[in-house]
Amino acid sequence: MTITARFLAALFTVTLAGIGIASAQTEIKVGVVSTMSGPDAQPGDEMNKGIDLYVKEHQKDLPAGVKVTLIYRDDTGANPDVAKRLATELVTRDHVNILAGAVWSPNAAAIASVATEAKVPFVIMNAAGASITRASPYIIRTSFTLWLVSTPIGQWAAKQGWKKAYTAVTDYAPGFDAEGGFTKGFTDGGGTVIDKVRMPFPTDDYSPFIQRIKDSKPNVAFIFVPAGKKATAVMKAWNDLGLTKAGIKLVTTQDVMLDEELPNMGDAPLGIVSAGTYSNAATRAANQVFLNAWRNAYGEKPIADFMSVAGWDGMAAIFDVVKQTNGKFDGDAAMKILSNWKTTDSPRGPISIDPNTRDVIENVYIRRVENLNGKLANVEFETIPNVKDPWKEANPPK
């Protein structure tokens, strides 16, 4: 054989080997529809950082020859039509294996039909409207629902002996859920909601609504607004109008007592009690592992919060699908795993997916804002274990 012939034969062998290596590589594409620009991008940034961090830390745990690729698309805010279009493009153009993300409930509801038609699993990592998982058999949720956190804080408020409450919530579906959950918990405990207001979305001026609360003189107010800078705007209005000095107590959800926003609120949140599924101050071992990885990746700022953890856990569920199937799955096979998924390694404590509702079961923590080592923190002082979404419990499918 001539030198040229030997060279060509060697080149042919190398080329075939290269093709073999390429064909052995299985790429799992995860299409993330998130909010990455506009005035309400903060929650999306927190969620995305949790997603990215999990992949960075655990890509090495995947089967040999398998990798997970994240493809992000920016819905720019609560824009259902945009979110649906982006999800459609991810499925038809990018051929993603799994859809994920969704900061806003209207966006998640719009994506549901895309997941159903394409038979592509959709892992919701934030959107908290209670009914969304019923919109498609291809949805699971790893975050929470507003009923899940609002009902316990209503129950807690009633146990304090407060008899008169006022509710103020953002005027969209998650706000209605928050209002409904608190009202149910508070009135079942013997309290009365003397008045309520639904605040426009979007708005950053909460003073007129906080003034209404003050004028009504309740024992306690329950407020819900979407997580982000709006939480600080609420607390500014509350502080400026002197409701604490007037003797009115405030209870809320983790959306308003947001770990990342506490440093921006001054001393106004001190003593405020909220219900949530996670606190950055929690001493659980799994949380310390998560926070160490977070700080190594991002430094002391931004501060990880419940949206970060829901993104982290959502990717943990997706990685379990990949590992159990060696990356060879279709939508139905993935949903069998996702619908029964559980872990004890979440930073927020044990979580699982209810196979009957495909919604999350998790601990709810009652937290109080305290000064911890010179910084404000949501300190967990009561745990309600393994809570299922109360709305679904009270409203079974017909």
Image (cartoon, helix red, strand yellow):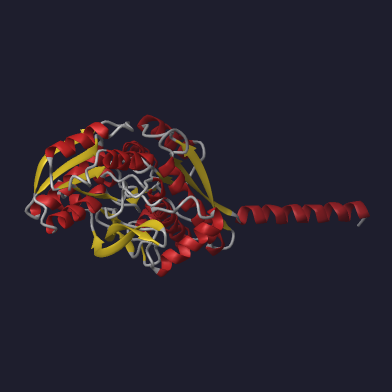
Residue 397, visible in the rendered structure: no
Q: Residue at x 87, y 54 (%)?
A: 7
Residue 376, visible in the rendered structure: yes
Q: Nearer the viewer, residue 337 or 388?
A: 388
Residue that extends furthest to the right in the rendered view of this protein: 2
Q: How many marks?
A: 0
In the image: residue 271, left or right of residue 63: left
Q: Nearer the viewer, residue 24 or 107?
A: 107
Q: Is residue 180 above or below residue 272?
A: above
Q: Nearer the viewer, residue 343 or 305?
A: 305
Q: Is residue 239 above or below residue 9?
A: above
Q: Nearer the viewer, residue 31 or 160?
A: 160
In the image: residue 59, left or right of residue 241: right
Q: Position of residue 269 (x, y in %)?
A: 31, 50
In the image: residue 108, left or right of residue 98: left
Q: Is residue 202 above or below residue 125?
A: above
Q: Position of residue 63 (x, y in %)?
A: 54, 63
In the image: residue 315, left or right of residue 157: right
Residue that extends furthest to the bottom in the rendered view of this protein: 285
Residue 378: quadrant of the picture:
bottom left
Quadrant location, the N terminus: bottom right
Residue 203: quadrant of the picture:
top left
Q: Residue at x 48, y 44 (%)?
A: 96
Q: Position of residue 192 (x, y in %)?
A: 8, 47
Q: Position of residue 114 (x, y in %)?
A: 37, 38
